[in-house]
Image (cartoon, rainbow, N blue to C red):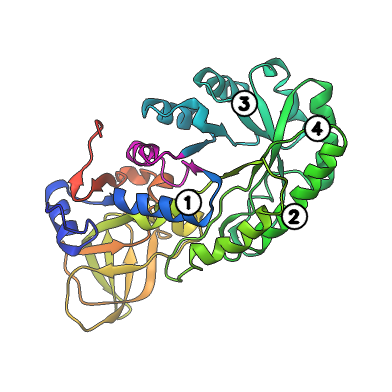
Amino acid sequence: MSLHEDPFSRQSAERLVAQYGSPLLIVDAERIRLQYRRLGVALPGVDLHYALKPLPHPAVVRVLGAQGAFFDLATSGEVDMVRSAGIAPARCIHTHPIKRDSDIRTALDFGVRTFIADNPDEIRKFIKYRNRASLLIRVAFRSPDATCDLSRKFGCEPEAVAALLRLAAEHQVEVEGLSFHVGSQTATPGMYVQAIKTCRNLLQQAMQEGFALRTLDIGGGFPADYVVTSTPIEEFCAPIIAALATLAPGLRLIAEPGRYLVADAALAVATVMGRALRDEQWWYYLDDGLYGSYSGRLFDHATFPLEALCGGTERFPSVLAGPTCDSIDIIAENIALPHLAVGDLIVGRSMGAYTWASATDFNLFPKAMVLTLDRGRLMTEED
């Protein structure tokens, strides 16, 4: 492949399918770097911890690690991945609010020292580890602008923070700060601003009670572009930065971007493996679907930009279906496509987040092969 060829071009996709087959998830390392740098400029002074769950792939971890990124871990499997990638444990935090004892021990044995808790039971789990760990208390802020409301499942009410601080102090468990996550794919920054203001008051109240908290984690949820273009990240973050500027100096600031860093950095390529004319519409059956890379249609409420890499200019209402025997496995209906033949390619764009990560091998159809390209060169495990 040419060093100057766009990994997402038609020529690149066709060449890679010819070489490796399909379905494929083509990840562009340079796009990840650009997103990371752009968010860093938009959030100056904030340590960016990549949340692995949208795309937990070793190549992505290595690319971001080389950029100096921090990491947000939530499972023992994610701990193992960053360890294998040579990431220093001091650059990692563990953010799952509900943890098994084995999860805590795995992270501690790696060297992670900062964890999240949002209720008394979770704080008590750290009594026996109080000399090895410190906590961030997660506060719930429910945003109506978020596609996925994470505060329904995690976080305490702001009014509960003081009691949790006292409980931790009673058991000599260190609390180093507060945390929140306003939800995933958040359309506007308003809830971030409100959450920061509330946390500012909570930090001041904690100081008055003798608790010297030194960290604020503002979570993730920064929006990515899909069929609908999101607010430019610089514009989105401007009011967040203004709100952060009102906090006491010396506070360490953390964010947990995931989707924003990787959504735009991957292209899904599938092949038409069959077709049928039903009710005067062509149905095209692909070798990838809702149980595979398009799982984000169900689990993440995402609508991905789709296009055919072949055919004429005339378009007809069509249906794209996945390969499994389940009738729910339909990617898109009434989509305008040219007439396609078996072997033609369909690509989905903005496919880096919550796609391959949540895919299954239902019906024993294999998940897409992930190929990470860096300036036209296929990355290997040694990169």
Q: Which residue is mark 4?
A: 211
Identified by mark 3, the residue type is: Arg
Res 40 label: 1
Q: Say left or right for 87 vs 200.
A: left
**Which-is-in-front pick, marks 4 and 3?**
4
Disc 4 versus disc 2: distance between alpha carbons?
18 Å
Q: Secondary structure at mark 4?
A: loop
Rendering coords of residue 363 (x, y %): 34, 45
Q: Are marks 3 and 2 in contact (CB under 8 Å)?
A: no
**Which-is-in-front pick, marks 3 and 1?**
1
Q: Secondary structure at mark 2?
A: helix
Q: Are marks 3 and 1 in contact (CB under 8 Å)?
A: no
Res 197 label: 2
Identified by mark 1, the residue type is: Gly
Q: Are marks 1 and 4 in contact (CB under 8 Å)?
A: no
In magenta, the rendered stretch is 48-69
Sequence-wise, the earlier of marks 3 and 1 is 1
Residue at left 80%, top 49%? 201
Q: Which residue is mark 3?
A: 100
Q: Residues within 10 Å of mark 3 (few under 14, many from 20)?
A: few
